Amino acid sequence: MFNKILIANRGEIACRVAATARRMAIQTVAVYSDADAHAKHVQACDEAVHIGNSAPRESYLRWEKIIAAAQATGAQAIHPGYGFLSENEEFAQACAKAGLVFIGPPASAILAMGLKAEAKQLMERAGVPLVPGYHAANQDPEVLQQAADAIGYPVLIKASAGGGGKGMRVVESATDFAQALASCKREASSSFGDDAVLIEKYVQRPRHIEIQVFGDMHGNYVHLFERDCSVQRRHQKVLEEAPAPGMTDALRLQMGAAAVAAARAVNYVGAGTVEFIVEPGSKTDGSTIGAFYFMEMNTRLQVEHPVTEAITGLDLVEWQLRVANGEPLPLRQEALAIQGHAIEARICAENPDKQFLPATGTLQVYALPDSSAFDRAPGAVRVDSGVRQGDAISPFYDSMVAKLIVHGATRQEALARMETALKQTHIVGLPTNVEFLRRVVRTPSFANADLDTALIAREAGVLFSRETVGLQIAAAALVAATLHAEQQAAKGTDRSGWVDPWARRDGWRSHGAYQRGFSVGFQEATHSVVLRKNTSTGAADGAPSGPWVLEVEGACAVFQFLAGDDHAFDLQWGPRRLLVWVYREGDVFHVFTNSGSTRITAIDALAHAGEAHAEVGRLTAPMPGKVVSMAVKAGDAVRKGQALAVMEAMKMEHTIAAPADGIVGEVLFAPGDQVTEGAELLRLQTPVAPI
Ligand code: ADP
Ligand code: ADP
Ligand code: MG
């Protein structure tokens, strides 16, 4: 086995690879960019080499630097993780030339599967079922239009070199085809440097089911069963699970054989994934899974590999290392079996209510479920994380910060464990999809395993901009956290231990000593909350006799709380009793309960007087990133909602739309420019009505 490997990646996957290497007594070398000088993956390795500036092009994609780092540190092999150089055949070749083992498939297999159209031609010859479509070389728009007409609408145009859910257009009818083709080609050439496309029948309500395969250098192949990755946003996976609900032994055999045939056709070695798009089952025979078609092969370790590890009890990175070292596959097909059910959730720094716009910022609070017992304790959760509390999420890389993986005897058990794990995930400092994931796993569709790629769209009504924690609970939590902080501060300064909850240092007193008012902001509105001393002598039967009475928008009841620690509170308010976790970030209180999370703001009436609000007419960058395109020029008249510019950051595109009708004043940036968050992109003038 290797003595030392270099991990050419960052974040959770670099940490995950390092963990297996450590267990196998293999030394590890990390590489890092400027932005990652203090990153978790650097600490997770035995040595680290700086490879350049923060932008991936200037660090994690610079393969000559990475190869030099491996040679300088005496590493014998390079693990590329996923993303970055993992599917770059030139890099795989360069490794071999430098006498380093590339922990992945041969360069020829990466090349063969790299372009979707060529891969499909190859699969056709290998007898793997394909989605009805066109994947020939001729890119004449006339020919493509005819092909689409012949397939029948709706069709999907895909960039052959595409990935990460980008470069795809659904076309509903023949008249829309030409325009969609042009726009897809534009995106393909700017994102992937190759404008070739293929056309597929657009499968309605499909499922995404993929097969994990493994090959070795001795011609052996196995598959490690399937994963269902149907729950997607922007054609990107959000939740993955194994096995696929509704999968039958017969179908698993067929799909497994097709996946192995695909791997064999390219002399595959190492870990790979064959992705299939699957038609819904027919109502008549009661099956939930219909015909399956090859979509693409990912020639690397996949983000969602931990669910396969959970149900097989295997370590796929260990298998990768053994295979790369020339050993035969550790197990034969007959020795592999599925145990229970596993689900993974991807935790991303993004804002689901703003079309999943990626977010940057600092992880002020990063409390995840305890994962120390995952291998031993049933019900324990596995956390694969690339960050720590206090770390910054920069605009340079992917927005995924961690993965939660749960395993149970049944899907129902795994689902319950996922709900618990998400409940225990408290992240403050930047928007994340945690609350969104909590809602997704509770939808009837997900709970009943009614899975397809439209699940999020179908359940949108309960997934977005909806409060699961109301004003009353949020306000009670704010009051409890405020009083607790004051008590703690008083204890620190007053030796007698005397606590006077009315001795506020940071606010105002309302009507004399026995009443205290708070002004709070909740969902764009301001509310008043009043706390009084409870002057009633005896409590009515059964009612709590707390020291206070709390009034929130007309609801008034006896109130008390117990602090578990500085963030956990047991609230009692009238007949309600509730556990809440509260984290303060300036004036904002982040409140987590067992049913959801929300934020509420303490408004200090004086502090905000005169503060400038966002100027109407200035259009600013919602995140740091690159300007991809400007759809307008100075003097153009635009309508409310019209797309003005497209920005890209963290692998996602975001369209800046006009907030009102108007005339474009000045355009301040050009496509290709890098902009900081808040930078003014262009000015919009509202037309003045003629007198
Ligand atoms: P999957 O099918 O596994 O979701 P994708 O093609 O979407 O695969 O990408 C795989 C993963 O690689 C992404 O989810 C992301 O975490 C990682 N990745 C890809 N490109 C980058 C990048 N430029 N920076 C950081 N991570 C990346
Ligand atoms: P990428 O390289 O971006 O991962 P894929 O070809 O794997 O691209 O497709 C990504 C996703 O797009 C799939 O998981 C599925 O949700 C959707 N998709 C792809 N092809 C089709 C199709 N023919 N019909 C319907 N949906 C599709
Ligand atoms: Mg894919």
Image (cartoon, rainbow, N blue to C red):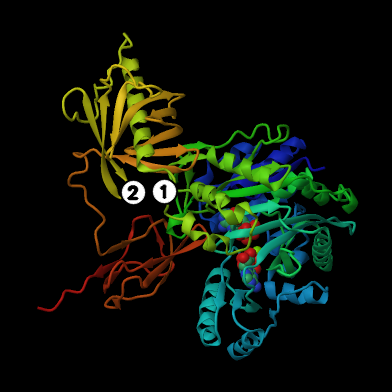
Which marked residue is nearer to the observer: mark 2 or mark 1?
1
**Mark 2 residue CB less than 8 A from any atom of ligand 1:** no
Disc 2 secondary structure class: loop
For the C terminus, give its image quadrant.
bottom left
Q: Quick one: which residue is furthest to the front in this view?
A: 541
Residue under the image location 80 percent in, 51 percent down: 324
Say left or right for 131 vs 566.
right
Say left or right for 567 vs 668.
right
Above/below status of 482 relative to 339: above
Circle 2: residue type: Gln
Return the x and y of residue 180 as percentages of the image width and height.
52, 80
Residue under the image location 46 percent in, 24 percent down: 564
Crowd class of label 1 (few under 14; some 14 to 19; many from 20; radius 10 Å): some
From the viewer's side, name the closer residue of 325 and 282: 282
Circle 1: residue type: Glu
C-alpha distance separating marks 2 and 1: 9 Å
Residue under the image location 60 percent in, 76 percent down: 156
The residue singled out by tag 2 in the image is: 523
Return the x and y of residue 452 as percentages of the image width and height.
63, 63
Above/below status of 24 relative to 62: above
Residue 467 is marked as: 1
Q: Quick one: which residue is furthest to the left in this view?
A: 691
Q: Is residue 34 visible?
A: no
Q: Ligand 3 shows up in which quadrant of the image?
A: bottom right
Say left or right for 684 vs 304.
left
Q: Is residue 193 visible?
A: yes
Return the x and y of residue 681 as percentages of the image width and height.
33, 64
| Tags 2 and 1 touching, CB below 8 Å | yes
From the viewer's side, name the closer residue of 4 and 432: 432
